[in-house]
Image (cartoon, coloured by chain):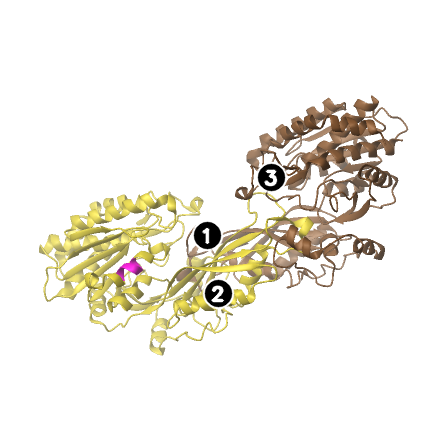
Chain colours: A yellow, B brown
């Protein structure tokens, strides 16, 4: 481990933070059409920083939606190639009124940097860039070959990169991918994530009467689109959260006993998880499964929202003509997104209440992935982590979905090192998203050391 | 029947329409705080027109929300007194994009006047004022005593008039009330409505996790406020629309066999009702009840909308922390609104899914009412109707709620003549609300003749 790299990171920490703040002020919300210009600005900002860190062949690649950013440095013959991936787009910040300070005005409180994207993923992606800068500064070159591919559609399904990867296999060819978009299992605990859930995100549209009807004149004989959607969706799960769609669990692979055992040895308090992270009266889900298994290795079905009918202040007595729900399903090995979507669509058709028409649209789909922990890159990553943080590295899964990991596996044939420095309470996709500032620096050092070790 | 009155209405028809258009251009949406000034303007407009029609003691009565408008003419000693009621407020026009012409720019197409409030209730209330003007013009006086009370909160539960009536019994004392806020059973068919459903309108709030959570990291173990509300509300009715709340049907009185028989003799085509009015694939509701009974004499439960979670364009993977639903129940004789609300609240508490907190708020409540068809005023109204429209008057009910009719019955001890001139397809509370222009004139004549006959 090169102490010089650590020293470089520490002595430039203030500038690193100022740069990151500049990045976080760009509201690059990929799902909102009105923010397309901001997304573009974030891509340009990323490209400029890749170049100034010392990378070559920097390129802003246009797509059908938001651009990709590419860069590389390939002057270490005989050494492995690492493909660094990140995303410069962010989730919408609503509900805005719950933010203590505005989402796009980064603010430090209690050692944390509060801003939309601070941890997911601008702050973490920027660690990669700063690690490269540090390695160049200290060694005058990189210890191995590096490629960067940074996207702007991660929060909206990543359609463009999903097309780009299979069409550019040679350009992106590498030995391993490096992604920092996850969290440490606990503060101070080096963590490598070796499993992710997949996701099928859908929109279900319900059409009832031809127009909104007066609930007095028609109530009792006319179908209600909002109620019909409620009736349908309520049937999707039983009271324990088990999905009732026929065959849903047919392809679900149980984790190996050894992996389950290792989860049992992780520090976990159901009471603290409930109180500090979830904050409801009780946890839910399959009672015969440990909580970590419920969120890491079991499929889910969630309704993210329903639009339709009257929801303003006061009262309006309509029978709504239309309603739309956002419904997603998290997938686990070995569920296939296409097959899952087909089962869901069929189930919707089979269970549509009387008088209504339903249509289901797929917004995105990606499979779950698991990585072999004995791969040499994972090994070196675990060592680098341990060296910087002075504690044994643990192997966990995450319930989230990083579709690109699946794309890298299937099209480039490479595993991904998931080396994330967020914390469990960092408010991912929520108001008051934060990134512990010290982890931003530790993360930059760990990434640099991993590249040093893997290139040694 | 005075032909002179009819002639007066016909020869002033263009001016009547221009005045009504002026009224309809005021967006007096009582539920939206931002329209309070427009609501006030509509009250002032009404007061001015009552005065210019020849009525006296015109008064704009302040309330806690929107003003009441009062006027009278009491110079017919020994003659009965009729209390004319109407409302100058309207429903919100959304969804705006479904209007062929803007809701507050009245437009004539195919003999219909299209505008929010054209039939409900500005156009119908204005018939009363124009009938008074015609009677003064033809006879130099009115054939009986008349009082007007016009409110601006009918579409938001009518709280102010509900307080005003019991506190001003002497001022409002009358032999009968006259309300034109319903529809003809069919075009050209004189119709008196002798029954209305009641309404309890509620807001159900659901609290899940303390903040919106990432559905990847927490999905499987954390409660979802939107899904919890869905689970709850789906249990409120069975597949045939029968309400499952314990004891809900205990107080439901069945209509007399003779009344049911008279409904069976009304022209009614289920196929046409489905095609022209509802416009869905099939009708719903209790299969063992005729459609007219389902909408006139059976209780309902409707969800008007759910707010909560993400419903914008694209995808956002949140587990929503909160959700709110607008839920109303139509009541029939002899259901008590307080008791109904208590049963619903208890049912919500008893059926709240795990991990969630629910609260129920009552926005308004009114009982169902039925009027005795052999009352002399109803009798004269039926005659006037028949004379003007040259066809036998039919007696129906309406599934809607006009809470004031219950207030008049319980506090003033008087029945209400429900003499409405809308049509079944007039788009009440919907986009493209319309009022057949000829019915505006026929209605004005019928109201005038009713007052002549009842005062004779």
Residue count near mark 3 (Cα–Cα under 10 Å), binned few <14, some 14–19, many ≥20: many
For the point 56% across and 49% down, the residue is A309
Q: Secondary structure at mark 1?
A: loop
Mark pair 2, 3: CA separation: 39 Å
Chain letter of the residue carrying label 1: B
> Mark 1 highlights which residue?
B310
Q: Is residue A247 visible?
A: yes
Farthest residue, direction bottom: A257
Residue contact between numbered discs 2 and 3, judged by CB atoms under 8 Å: no
Which mark is drawn over residue B31? 3
Which mark is drawn over residue A345? 2
Where residue A230 sits, quadrant-wise, is bottom right
Where residue B55 sits, quadrant-wise, is top right
Q: Secondary structure at mark 2?
A: helix
Q: Main secondary structure of the magenta part?
A: helix
Q: Nearer the viewer, mark 2 or mark 3?
A: 2
Magenta stretch: give its range.
A161-165
Q: Judge from the rendering whether residue A252 lies leftward or rightward of residue B409; answer left or right.
A: left
Q: Judge from the rendering whether residue A229 lies leftward or rightward of residue B449; answer left or right.
A: left
């Amino acid at each position: 481990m090169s102490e010089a790299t650590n020293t470089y990171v520490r002595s430039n920490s203030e500038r690193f933070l100022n740069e990151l703040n500049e990045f976080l002020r760009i509201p690059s919300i990929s799902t909102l059409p009105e923010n397309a210009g901001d997304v573009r600005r974030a891509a340009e900002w990323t490209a400029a920083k890749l170049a100034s860190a010392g990378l070559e062949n920097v390129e802003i690649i246009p797509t059908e939606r938001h651009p990709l950013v590419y860069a590389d440095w390939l002057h270490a013959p005989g050494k492995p190639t690492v493909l660094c991936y990140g995303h410069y787009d962010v989730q919408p910040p609503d509900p805005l009124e719950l933010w203590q300070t505005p989402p796009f005005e980064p603010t430090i409180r209690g050692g944390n940097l509060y801003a939309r994207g601070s941890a997911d993923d601008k702050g973490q992606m920027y660690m990669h860039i700063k690690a490269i800068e540090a390695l160049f500064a200290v060694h005058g070159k990189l210890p191995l070959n590096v490629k960067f591919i940074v996207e702007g559609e991660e929060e909206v399904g990543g359609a463009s990169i999903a097309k780009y990867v299979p069409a550019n296999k040679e350009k992106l060819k590498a030995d391993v991918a490096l992604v920092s978009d996850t969290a440490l299992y606990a503060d101070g605990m080096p963590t490598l994530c070796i499993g992710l859930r997949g996701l099928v995100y859908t929109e279900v549209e319900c059409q009832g009467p031809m127009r909104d009807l007066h609930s007095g004149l028609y109530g009792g004989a006319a179908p209600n689109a909002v109620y019909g959607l409620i009736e349908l969706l309520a049937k999707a799960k039983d009271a324990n959260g088990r999905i009732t769609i026929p065959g849903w669990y047919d392809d679900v692979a149980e984790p190996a006993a050894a992996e389950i055992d290792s989860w049992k040895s992780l520090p976990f308090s159901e009471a603290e998880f409930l109180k500090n992270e979830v904050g409801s009266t009780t946890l839910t889900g399959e009672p015969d499964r440990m909580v970590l298994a419920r969120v890491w290795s079991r499929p889910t079905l969630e309704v993210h929202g329903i639009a339709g009918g009257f929801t303003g202040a006061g009262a309006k007595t309509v029978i709504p003509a239309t309603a739309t729900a956002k419904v997603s399903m998290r997938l686990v090995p070995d569920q296939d997104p296409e097959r899952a979507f087909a089962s869901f669509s069929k189930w919707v058709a089979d269970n549509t209440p009387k008088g209504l028409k339903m249509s289901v649209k797929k917004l995105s789909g990606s499979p779950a992935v698991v990585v072999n922990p004995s791969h040499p890159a994972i090994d070196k990553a675990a060592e680098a982590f341990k060296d910087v943080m002075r504690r044994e590295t643990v192997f966990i899964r995450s319930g989230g979905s990083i579709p690109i990991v699946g794309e890298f596996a299937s099209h480039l044939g490479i595993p991904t090192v998931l080396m994330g420095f967020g914390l469990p309470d960092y408010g991912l996709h929520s108001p008051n998203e934060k990134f512990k500032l010290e982890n931003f620096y530790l993360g930059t050092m760990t990434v640099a050391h991993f590249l040093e070790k893997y290139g040694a």
